[in-house]
Amino acid sequence: MSITRNNHYVPQWYQQGFLEPGRSSLAYVDMTPDRQVLADGRVITQRGAWDNTPTSLAFRQKDLYSTFFGTCINDEMTCGAL
């Protein structure tokens, strides 16, 4: 089984409840949009901060649930007492 590295902290099924009728993507704000510093010192945003983002790309973080033991990566979640 493959290791899952991009984990959703808001499940996709829950995100779909916020879609507008007839839409398949969310209006999602990018809090760190690409920026460019111009020669005169001005900073411009490369693209708009608001994106139409599918639920597969929204509210996820790389290695949110991963653990690392040396070079081994584990994505298993366990429940219950040890």
Image (cartoon, rainbow, N blue to C red):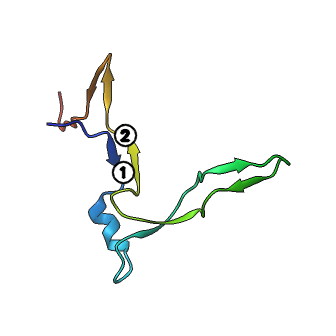
| Direction from residue 34 to residue 7 in the image, left or right | left
Q: Could you tell me if the residues under marks 2 and 1 are in contact, i.e. CB atoms within 8 Å? A: yes
Dot 2 alpha-carbon crowd within 10 angstroms: few under 14, some 14 to 19, many 20 or more = some
Closest to the observer, 47 or 19? 47
Please tell me whether mark 1 sits on a helix, a strand or a loop.
loop
Rendered position, 26 above or below 58: below
Q: Using the image, tell me which numbered label, if any, was put on residue 64.
A: 2
| Direction from residue 30 to residue 25 in the image, left or right | left
In percent of width and height, residue 27 lies at 48, 70
Q: What amino acid type should be assigned to the residue bearing mark 1?
A: Tyr
For residue 75, what is the image quadrant?
Answer: top left
Residue for badge 1:
9
Dot 1 alpha-carbon crowd within 10 angstroms: few under 14, some 14 to 19, many 20 or more = few
Closest to the observer, 15 or 25? 25
In percent of width and height, residue 5 lies at 31, 39
Tell me the residue at 18%/38% (across/down). Answer: 79
Position of the C terminus, as image quadrant, is: top left
For residue 48, what is the image quadrant?
Answer: bottom right
Q: What amino acid type should be assigned to the residue bearing mark 2?
A: Leu
Which is nearer the N-term, disc 2 or disc 1? 1
Rendered position, 49 above or below 3: below
Tell me the residue at 37%/75% (across/down). Answer: 19
Position of the N terminus, as image quadrant, is: top left
Q: Residue furthest bottom?
A: 21
Please tell me whether mark 2 sits on a helix, a strand or a loop.
loop
Mark 2 → mark 1, Cα distance in angstroms? 8 Å
In percent of width and height, residue 44 lies at 72, 56
